[in-house]
Image (cartoon, rainbow, N blue to C red):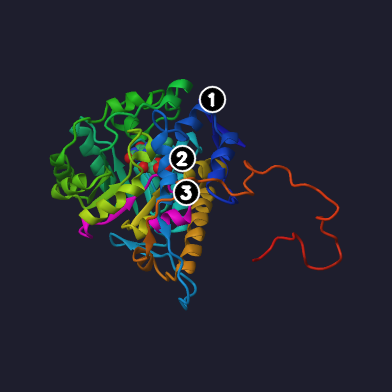
Amino acid sequence: MTAYYNGFPQSDRDEAISMINLDELEERAKSVMPEGAYYYIASGSENEWTWRNNTTAFNHFQIVPRALTNMTDPQTDTKFMGMDLKTPIMISPIACHGIAHKDAEVATQKGAAAAGALFSSSTYANKSVEDIAAAAPDAPRFFQLYLSKDWEFNKMVFDAVKKAGYKGIFLTVDALVSGYREANLRTKFAYPVPLDFFTRYQGGKGEGQTVAQMYASSAQKIGPDDVRRIKEMSGLPVIVKGVVCAEDAYLAMGAGADGIYVTNHGGREVDSGPATIDMLPEIAKAVNHRVPIIFDSGVRRGSHVFKALALGADIVGIGRPYLYALALGGAKGVESVIKQLNDELIIDMQLTGCKTIEDVKHARLTHFNYTADNLKSNTDPSRITPYPVTKENQMKDDGSDAVSGASQA
Ligand SMILES: Cc1cc2nc3c(=O)[nH]c(=O)nc-3n(C[C@H](O)[C@H](O)[C@H](O)COP(=O)(O)O)c2cc1C
């Protein structure tokens, strides 16, 4: 069934989804989302070069398999800033989950909590910070801040977030204006579902606004003093989101940042900027374990999570894939996507002798210069041609257990 908000179709599913990998969700989500909403998610800025390279650049690093490790049953539970998590995979903040599901962030939070993953909520959420918190009272969560030019608005947001028990603030500094996103222009995208904080505090409904209009109400001028002021006013830890070079990590730490969030906004802001995974090593070196590091942009595989951890991240976020999963399966869909990625991570942990996430952080990677292709596997539906049927290659039902002819080797 589909719910409608002012004529806008919203999924109301709540079912586990099966998948072979995260990439396939991108295509499947089209069936449950209108075109404008879909491309708001599934696009980057300008030529989308950075967006594509965020994922392919993981091939610049290679995981060294380890032998004779005498280890089994790897565990992905981890601690982050005092929080106990079942996985190092995090739900990155994304605006307006209502474009994917009628229960919006409430459903996403439930799915994240069921998977034991850290959730983070955008300033541009449809649901209130209180309703999101009530969806999983014992689960830890962060709040992402688009700083407003109006400090009265900021103060009201801080008070609400603190009262609702959020553990800290991600201050987004890489999206002072919207990147030049052609998809939004072509589809004339505007937020179809009201954004709670705008409804509550500005009287405006935050509905029918374009992305550029929404950004216009937030501050374009953000500096180190703002980090100090937000910490002081909110009384919460502040993690600076949008750091892609060592210089900015130093600046943020100098301003008292409690963490560094390495991201290029999933390739939605500066196009032709470097992939975040390529910048992570220099940032990790600059940070030198003084504060924790969050990483995202382009993560689609357990091996990507593994590499980010091994290169210095403490926790690794995903964006677009969980929104597709939300549309395809609601809270249970979100749980499924985190589980899929975590299961892939566990395979890499077993094959490298990493019993714990701490071991992954010390795992050995190489940095050889292979071509950074990310070809889909030979059995991916987008690549296969029909398998030839011959007299010699057909299975014969002789009553044995053989069912597929697939090799275990
Ligand atoms: C549709 C969409 C909306 C987003 N909204 C926000 C937002 O409100 N605040 C923010 O800090 N980042 C936002 N981001 C960026 C994400 O937090 C994250 O950095 C990015 O999605 C990671 O890349 P990935 O989608 O390739 O995993 C958004 C990303 C997408 C795809």
Q: Residue 2 sits in which quadrant?
A: top right
Question: Quick one: label 3, few (<14), some, or many (20+) residues within 10 Å?
Answer: some
Question: Is disc 1 in contact with disc 2, using a CB cutoff of under 8 Å?
Answer: no
Cα separation between marks 1 and 2: 16 Å
The magenta-colored residue range is: 287-307
Q: Going from the N terminus, do you reach mark 1 or mark 2 first?
A: 1
Residue 380, given in percent of the width and then of the height, sits at: 62, 46
Check disc 1 and give the amino acid type. Gly
Q: Residue 404 sits in which quadrant?
A: bottom right
Q: Residue at point 41% right, 46% down?
A: 57
Image-based side of 30 in relation to 129, left or right: right
Q: Residue at point 39% right, 55% down?
A: 368
Q: Is residue 26 visible?
A: yes
Residue under label 3: 300
Residue 336, given in percent of the width and then of the height, sits at: 53, 53
Image-based side of 265 in relation to 23, left or right: left
Q: Which mark is residue 104?
A: 2
Cα separation between marks 3 and 2: 22 Å
Q: Going from the N terminus, do you reach mark 3 or mark 2 first?
A: 2
Q: Which mark is residue 7?
A: 1
Report if the beta carbon of the residue with label 3 is closer than 8 angstroms to ligand 1: yes
